[in-house]
Image: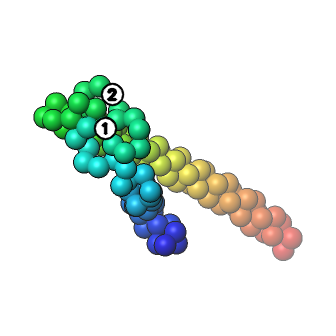
Amino acid sequence: MAAAGLRGGLRGALVMQQRGWSSGSGSDQLGELGSGAGKGGGGGGSIREAGGAFGKRQAAHEERYFRDKEREQLASLREHHEEEIDHHKKEIQRLQKEIDRHKNKIKKLKGDDD
């Protein structure tokens, strides 16, 4: 199952992590988010512990916050990798010019031998 996460790239790895988090023994202790304190002890704050509409609203707000944060992090990571790719392409071009320069020097040296 881990190999499938690796083949799917970052998205696959994230899905595998989420499956691991949601399928563990802790998920049955949480119950429905915002519905009050779970069996595991802490409920995540007084509003969530109280349950009801405010608890559900708070849980939804937190979930939205973390989704937005994850989206920002993925965008930042994507931008970083694009910059890395651009840097490596420029480095390839620079090294190709160096190779061509050395090949020309070799040609000139071979021309002197005749």
Classify 20 as above or below 42: below
Classify 18 as above or below 57: below
Q: Nearer the viewer, mark 1 or mark 2?
A: 1
For residue 34, what is the image quadrant? top left
Q: Residue, x 35% and y 33% (percent of image)? A: 44
Q: Quadrant of the C terminus?
A: bottom right
Q: Residue, x 52% and y 72% (percent of image)? A: 3
> Which x, y percent locates residue 55?
21, 33
For label 2, count other residues whose C-alpha is less than 10 Å away and answer few (under 14), some (14-19) or many (20+): few
For label 1, count other residues whose C-alpha is less than 10 Å away and answer few (under 14), some (14-19) or many (20+): many
- Count numbered badges in the picture: 2
Can you identify the residue that label 1 sits on?
37
User: What is the secondary structure assignment of the residue under circle 2?
Assistant: loop
> Which x, y percent locates residue 25?
44, 56
> Which x, y percent locates residue 45?
33, 28
Classify 26 as above or below 72: below
Disc with the residue nearer the chain's start (1 vs 2): 1
Specify the farthest residue to the right.
Answer: 113
> Which x, y percent locates residue 48?
26, 32
Q: Closest to the observer: 3 or 104?
A: 3
| Residue kind at label 2, given as amino acid type | Gly
Query: Which of the colour schemes (rainbow, by chain, secondary structure, one colour) is used?
Result: rainbow
Q: Tell me the number on the disc at residue 45.
A: 2
User: What is the secondary structure assignment of the residue under circle 1?
Assistant: loop
Q: Tell me the number on the disc at residue 77.
A: none
Q: Closest to the observer: 2 or 31?
A: 31
C-alpha gap between disc 1 and disc 2: 9 Å
For residue 67, what is the image quadrant? top left
| Residue kind at label 1, given as amino acid type | Ala
